[in-house]
Amino acid sequence: MESYLFRETQKFNQIWIWVLLLSLSGAILWGIVRQVFLDKPIGPHPIPDIFLILLLLLPLALMLLFRSISLTTTVEKDLVLIEFHPFATRIILEDEIAKHYIRTYQPIREFGGWGLRIGIRRRAYTLSGKEGVQLELHNGHKILIGTKDPEALDKAITRMFLV
């Protein structure tokens, strides 16, 4: 039997970032082929071949990082667990929550985009979309959890108080 009331894992899926990183990798790779293998230097003062090859590691490392990013939200009988892998884990105990509700948010306007966003007395854990569940804690802090299924998450938090 599952020990949780709700569990959702989201992966990083901002297509525009993947397109940008793949395009950048392709351009750098073309530069490597042109300068190293075709012996046609790039510009009047080309950078050394080794630096050009090392430059390719930057977008590749960013692709690996973005591939590893995930947001897992779990509601158990007495807590909400937010795992924003590989950066942060947050445990919110049932008795810390004053209220919770579904809300639509504007990620760019309110938080400057998606991801782990930290402000004064507020945090947002989002990967995509505009729907989430807002937690208001007894200490005055607000935590927004982005989710693909806000109704199920909100319902699970309500059930947590009944268990």
Image (cartoon, rainbow, N blue to C red):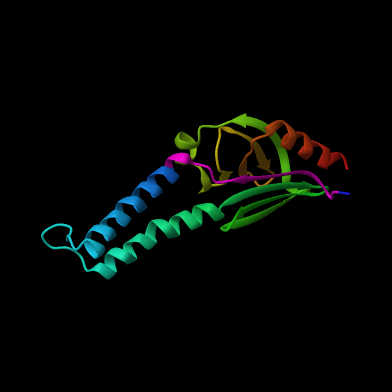
- Where does the C terminus fall, quadrant-wise? top right
Position in image of residue 51 (x %, y %): 28, 67
Residue depicted at x 32% and y 56%: 29
Residue situated in front as seen by the camera: 81 or 31: 31
- In the image, 122: left or right of 43? right
Magenta-tinted stretch: 2-16
Position in image of residue 64 (x %, y %): 49, 57
Q: Is residue 135 above or below residue 39?
A: above
Q: Is residue 47 above or below residue 130?
A: below
Residue situated in front as seen by the camera: 75 or 17: 17
Position in image of residue 92 (x %, y %): 71, 50
- Marker count (numbered): 0
Queried whether the magenta region covers residue 76, the answer comes back as no
- In the image, 135: left or right of 107? right
Q: Is residue 85 above or below residue 139?
A: below
Position in image of residue 118 (x %, y %): 52, 49
Residue depicted at x 62% and y 30%: 103
- In the image, 128: left or right of 43? right
